[in-house]
Image (cartoon, helix red, strand yellow):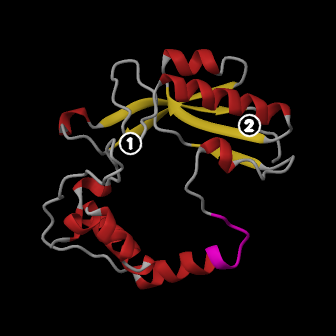
Amino acid sequence: MNVYQCIKDDKKFKRIADYKRAARTIYLNKACFNGLYRVNSKNEFNVPFGKKLKVNTYEGQNLGIICGYLNYNNIKILSVDFDESVRDAKKGDFIYFDPPYDSDTSIFNSYTEGGFGKDEQRRLARVFKELDKRGYYVMLSNHNTTLINKLYKDYHIHIIKAKRSINANGKKRGKVEEVIITNFENNQDI
């Protein structure tokens, strides 16, 4: 049984020790197409193999640095809905959202089990606005689309050109317009 089959078989995968599951996830990420992580509507990893001759899965020094940073700082990693992830935030905290991006031309939004469509974008905007009212510093990135500009029209919208290296069609790789949205000025201290 290969790594992908073991992860796909949910019952067997859940019986594997956490550290082994983490190792398999790292391997898949390093071995797959362009280091992309994506799941389908069944929450199964679905990125094609990257056709690499050699896969470097262990970078000891880097892992040690990350481990130390996470262990010696007040950092919590959650896998929950974005609304739930900010429930313990305190006034004055900085919160950054990087959701699955909106699109004016595509209906693809299946990087999560339930998808992340227009309704989820609107719900995220409501959470953003509520956090703003409660005194948080909030930042969000997204594509520069009609919906996103409408949802955040009362905030600071900064248009940037972002390089995209991941696309099945190499000719479609390049710079795209994204937005960074904040509820604070650039020169404001956070």
Whether residue 184 can be seen here: no
Q: Quadrant of residue 177?
A: top left
**Side of 162 where 105 appears, left or right:** left
The amino acid pointed to by label 2 is Asn
Residue 170 located left or right of residue 111:
left
Q: Position of residue 79 (x, y in %)?
A: 55, 56
> How many other residues sit within 10 Å of disc 1, few (<14), some (14-19) or many (≥20)?
some
Left or right: where does residue 31 sit relative to residue 184?
left
Q: Nearer the viewer, residue 60 or 91?
A: 91
Q: How many marks?
A: 2
Residue drawn at point x = 46 percent, y = 84 percent: 61
Q: Nearer the viewer, residue 32 or 84?
A: 84
Q: Quadrant of the N terminus?
A: bottom left
Q: CA distance from mark 1 to mark 2?
A: 31 Å
- Label 2 SS: loop
State the image coordinates of residue 148 (x, y, percent, origin top left): 55, 22
Residue at the image position 42 percent from the left and 84 percent from the top: 60
Which residue is tagged 1? Answer: 111
- Crowding at dot 2, Cα within 10 Å, few <14 / some 14-19 / many 20+, comes out as few
Q: Position of residue 93 (x, y in %)?
A: 80, 50
The residue that disc 2 covers is 186
Answer whether residue 98 is visible to the viewer in this image.
yes
User: To which quarter of the image does residue 136 belong?
Assistant: top right
Q: Residue furthest front?
A: 11
Q: Give left or right: position of 25 versus 120.
A: left
Picture layout, residue 85 above or below residue 105: below
The question of residue 28 being in magenta is answered with no
Q: Which residues are magenta?
A: 70-76
Q: Which mark is residue 167?
A: none
Q: Residue 109: percent from the left, percent from the top?
A: 38, 33
